[in-house]
Image (cartoon, rainbow, N blue to C red):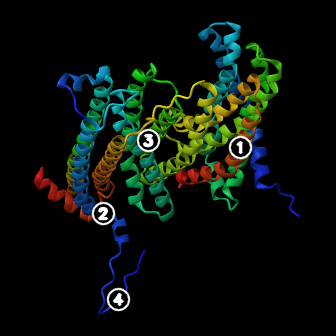
Amino acid sequence: MQWESWNAFWEMGGAGPFVWGSYAVTAVLVTMELVMVLRGRSETVRRLLRLRRVTAGQESGRRSRDRA
Amino acid sequence: MSALPSPFAAVLRRDLLLAWRGRADVLVTLAFFVVVVCLFPFGVGAEPNLLRAIAPGVLWVAALLATLLSLHRLFAQDHADGTLEQLLLTPEPTVLWVTAKVAAHWIATGLPLVLVAPGLALLFDVEQGALPILTLSLALGTPILALLGAVGAALTLGLRGGGMLLALLVLPLFVPVLIFGAGAVDAYLSGSGADAHLLLLGGGLLGALALAPFACAAALRIALE
Amino acid sequence: MRETTITTSRPEPRSLLRFAAPQMFYPLAGRLAPWFATVALVLTLAGLWLAFFVAPTDAQQGEVYRVIFIHVPAAWMSMFIYLVMAFWSAVGLVMNTRLSFLMSRALAPTGAMFCFVALWTGALWGKPTWGAYWVWDARLTSQLLLLFLYLGFMALTTAIEDPRRSDRAGAIIALVGAVNVPIIYFSVKWWNTLHQGASVSLTEAPSMAATMLAGMLVMALAAWAYSIAVALWRVRALILERERHTEWVGAELTAQEGKL
């Protein structure tokens, strides 16, 4: 497929907005999904670590109260 | 020989009795149906040809929405007072009394819609010959809606915001029933005959009767274990 | 539960079923996902090259047809992913394996995303070709209802807090939806041909040049590899969340803490 010029490629025979609108939105959604998945994992790890610290803190607090 | 009624009959009788005692609640569903149907002329204009054309769709969509809104009463009350758990604990097959509950629910909420729809159709000047087709399509279709809706109601039992969630879950499943139900009347009016549509609805009803109670029973067990 | 046999000589053969345990699957998924992601990237680049620099201008539709290189793979994937979701739901209900339910949940957002992409690209293809963004064509309408099924699954599983109930309720609605998908498609097709005079088909490229088909297939494979990678990554986070009370997750968290 030979394009006459960069302009021809960009305009897609007049259907430029439709073609590039499709590809652009898809790229955005795929990127968003990747970001959300990979960030979601580190957020989960952080949240679970915080949860672990909190429950450990509560446990030791309870134990020291029991001993007292 | 046993003098005791079968579990199906017992639950059916109980639910019908409860529906009768709480008939104000049941009549609200019917009133909603009538009001929604009457809204459309205000929205699209009172031009007779237009109203005649949209009548089957409007009646069907209104019946669908009324069914949806009435689904909460299927399990909610029994769930609240613990009867549902008791029913699940009995040795009787769950699908039996679940079918009875849905049947009672349809008799109380769906059947009135079927009976009133022809009268409402006259408001839209629907051709008289089409009225039996309309009634039959609703008579076959509203039980399917009740059966499918029961599965949704069981899945969303006790959830916050359950009503909206139930609608989201169940409306896509309703679409084929709507297509064939409203389509039956249109097919009759356009001369091609409603036989295929009505037969498909009948088949759908049999299929739903065979399968939905099992899905519903499974969903209830999941919700209450 | 398999009982360990006490043997003195032969070790027990390791079966693939051991990966049904979240603890075993977690590292496996971690190793596999980057491979699938790389394959997806390579295939996407190849597909895009085919789409824009190999496939010729279409005789009837000009250049706008190039949207099919996204539209058709997205539509295929949205339906395929739903079937896989239904499969894992069934496996979970029958074999009572937590991981199956987690896999279902991990797949849903990607399926919904592809569904939306199919609808969006379908609309953008329809406007220049048929004059309207939406013509209630049978395939696109079925795609719309499929999106609602996905959203319903995601809404239900999110709304139920108890994990066991959430897993199983989601599995039921996924299966009920799967049974209904052919019914919905058939009824919408019927409805569309009765109510519309001309049959408007947005996914038929009448004379499909070999290069066009090749481009579509490559993009479809890319989408498939991408879906697997994303689902594996997502399920790892779900496993950590779900198994957070176990020792191995505790150890994993401690290991991750060092990296944060």
Task: Identify the amino acid type marked 2.
Answer: Phe
Q: Nearer the observer, disc 2 or disc 4?
A: 2
Near mark 3 (Cα within 10 A), the count class, few <14, some 14-19 or many ≥20, is some
Disc 2 crowd, CA 10 A, few/some/many (<14, 14-19, 20+): some
Query: Badge 3 is on which residue?
Result: C159
Residue beneath the point at 43% across and 50% down: C162
Among all residues in the image, which is located at the extreme right? B1
Say which mark, if any, is on residue C25: 2
Label 4 near label 2: C-beta < 8 Å? no
Q: CA distance from mark 1 to mark 2?
A: 43 Å
User: Which residue is located at x 50 percent, y 57 percent?
Assistant: C90
Is B146 drawn above or below residue C102 in the view shown? Answer: above
Residue type at mark 4: give it: Ile
Q: Residues within 10 Å of mark 4 (few under 14, many from 20)?
A: few
Q: Tell me the amino acid under the disc marked 1.
A: Leu
Q: Chain of mark 3?
A: C
- Gap in angstroms between the C-alphas marked 3 and 4: 46 Å
Q: Is residue B21 visible?
A: no
| Residue highlighted by disc 1 | B205
- Going from N to C along the chain, the mark reached first, 2 or 4, is 4
Q: Residue C253: image x %, image y %?
A: 20, 57
Quickly name the residue at label 4: C6
Helix, strand or loop for disc 4: loop
> For residue B113, which quarter of the picture?
top right
Residue B208 locus on image (x, y percent): 67, 46
Q: Residue at x 44, y 56 (%)?
A: C88
